Image (cartoon, rainbow, N blue to C red):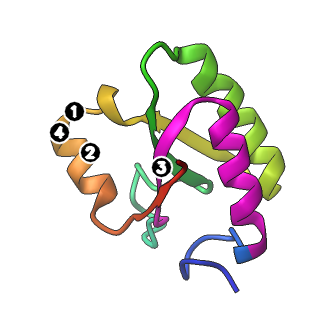
Amino acid sequence: QGLMTSTTITRESVGQVIQTCRRYGVQRFWLVEKARNGSDPHSLDKSEFVVELAPGRSVLDLAGLEVDLAADINEDVAVYDFESLPEQIRGGLLVNAEEFSVG
């Protein structure tokens, strides 16, 4: 069973996801609930992660993280940098998101 009804990330794969995030300097991340409306142009058929990176990390870390997370959960993913998202978009994405601390 997944952590959220609309994702395929299992409790077993969360540990691997956290390890991958740690390697790329993620301090915390949010797993965004997938949109259920197929007609929504912003609805993606992938898991979406919003990540808060440690200072000094770059877009290259985001790109590598996206590739490795996709391998971890065997699904296409989209990764967004928390600080780069406009506040309105950030709020909309995180409304139904589950937050994880990487530590």
Q: Are marks 3 and 1 in contact (CB under 8 Å)?
A: no
* Image quadrant where residue 79 sits: top right
Q: Are marks 1 and 4 in contact (CB under 8 Å)?
A: yes
**Left or right: 18 as drawn, with respect to 36:** right
Which residue in the structure is indicated by mark 1? 86
How far apart are the alpha carbons under marks 3 and 1? 17 Å
Part of the protein shown in magenta: 12-34
How far apart are the alpha carbons under marks 4 and 2? 5 Å
Q: Position of residue 57 (x, y in %)?
A: 52, 17
Which residue in the structure is indicated by mark 2? 90
Q: Are marks 1 and 2 in contact (CB under 8 Å)?
A: yes
SS at mark 2 in the image: helix
Which residue in the structure is indicated by mark 4? 87
Q: Estimate how packed mark 2 is, as few (under 14), some (14 to 19) or many (20 or more) residues with alpha carbons within 10 Å.
A: some
* Image quadrant where residue 99 sits: bottom left
Which residue in the structure is indicated by mark 3? 29
- Please determine whether, in this image, residue 101 is positioned above or below residue 57: below
Q: Which amino acid type is shown beneath numbered disc 4? A: Glu
